[in-house]
């Protein structure tokens, strides 16, 4: 189960944990994402995405 929301700084090829936690929330769907499963994010917008589906939806919206 998810315990604490992490605060993350998203970098081009990695991310930096600013505040310890075990998950973040997808910017599109609101689904929790375990940090060890986090693969998709936008550096400019500083947003995480649950999967490529949510990431491409964000790109389509522009």
Image (cartoon, grey):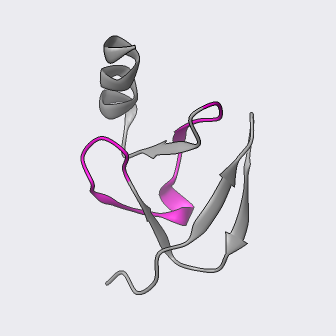
7 on left or right of 58 = right
Tell me the quarter of the image containing the C terminus. Answer: top left
Q: Is residue 28 magenta?
A: yes
Taking the spot 24% from the left edge, 46% from the top edge, the residue there is 29
57 on left or right of 23 = left
Taking the spot 51% from the left edge, 77% from the top edge, the residue there is 22
Q: Is residue 20 above or below residue 49?
A: below
Residue 39: x %, y % from top left: 53, 44
Residue 8: x %, y % from top left: 64, 60
Taking the spot 36% from the left edge, 21% from the top edge, the residue there is 56
Residue 5: x %, y % from top left: 47, 75
Q: Which residues are magenta?
A: 26-44
Q: Is residue 47 above or below residue 1?
A: above
53 on left or right of 45 = left
Q: Nearer the viewer, residue 46 or 36?
A: 46
Residue 12: x %, y % from top left: 74, 34
Q: Is residue 1 above or below residue 55?
A: below
């Amino acid at each position: 189960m998810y315990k604490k929301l992490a605060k993350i700084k998203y970098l081009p090829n990695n991310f930096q944990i600013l505040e310890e936690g075990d998950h973040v929330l997808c910017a599109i769907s609101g689904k929790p994402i375990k940090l060890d499963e986090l693969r998709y994010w936008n550096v400019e917008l500083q947003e995480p995405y649950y999967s490529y589906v949510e990431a491409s939806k964000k790109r389509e919206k522009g």
